[in-house]
Image (cartoon, rainbow, N blue to C red):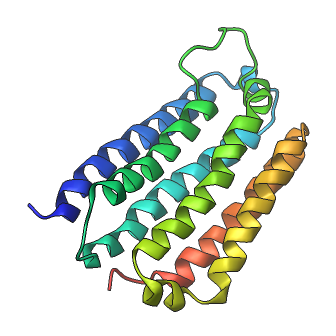
Amino acid sequence: MDAYGHLRILVSLILGLAITRVLSGLARRLQEPIKTDRRHAQIIWSFVLLLSAVHFWWWEFALRFIDHWNFWIYVFILSYASLFFLMSTLLYPDHIHEHADREDFFIRRRHAFFALFAISFAFDLIDTLIKGRDHLAALGIWYGVRLLAGAAIALIAMKTEDSRKLTWLGLIWLAGSIVWITTLYGGLD
């Protein structure tokens, strides 16, 4: 098995854990709607995280072109994938008091969640550079705009306690991500 194939298995496991956690959390939200007080920031950011995890897996398909692997690139890619799992644990923690409002819990933990979200953009840039300058150039100027916009949204989200603002920030990022992914990735070629 080549280095990429070996890495792909571990990345898939980590992303699978993140996706499972988010889907399980969304299922709990559907089962217990009274614990959310009709607020939806956690749900919107769950969809952002799900799309981001799937996009990450797709994005990492370009790793197959790397000829020279080393242990630190391997660890870096696994660390990047782990950010998605860590964000999923902040969206849906293991233990929450059974009468606690899940949305309030997410808002109280937003600093850590959005700090990881912001860090993911630095990881994204390094990951892109690992894939080569040609790969970076092929993404164009909008790639840089996307990274800066994501970091800005993360910083704004850290500063607001308003669930509606967090919902709108999530919807804006989600819409932008859908446009970005649709425009850039029509196929695996």
Residue, x 39% and y 37% (percent of image)? 17
Point out residue 15 in the picture as x, y percentages from the top left corner. 39, 47
Q: In terms of image quadrants, where is residue 121?
A: bottom right
Point out residue 76 in the picture as x, y percentages from the top left corner. 41, 54
Residue, x 45% and y 58% (percent of image)? 54
Closest to the observer, 29 or 131: 131
Instruction: Judge from the rendering whether residue 16 lies leftward or rightward of residue 123; answer left or right.
Output: left
Point out residue 177 in the picture as x, y percentages from the top left corner. 63, 69
Instruction: Judge from the rendering whether residue 77 lies leftward or rightward of residue 181; answer left or right.
Output: left
Point out residue 136 in the picture as x, y percentages from the top left corner. 51, 84
> Which quarter of the rendering shows the N terminus?
bottom left
Closest to the observer, 178 or 8: 8
Residue, x 74% and y 60% (percent of image)? 151
Closest to the observer, 27 or 173: 173
Residue, x 48% and y 54% (percent of image)? 53
| Residue that extends furthest to the left in the rendered view of this protein | 1
Q: In terms of image quadrants, where is residue 181?
A: bottom right
> Which quarter of the rendering shows the C terminus?
bottom left
- All told, the count of numbered labels is 0
Is residue 36 positioned above or below 4 on the image? above
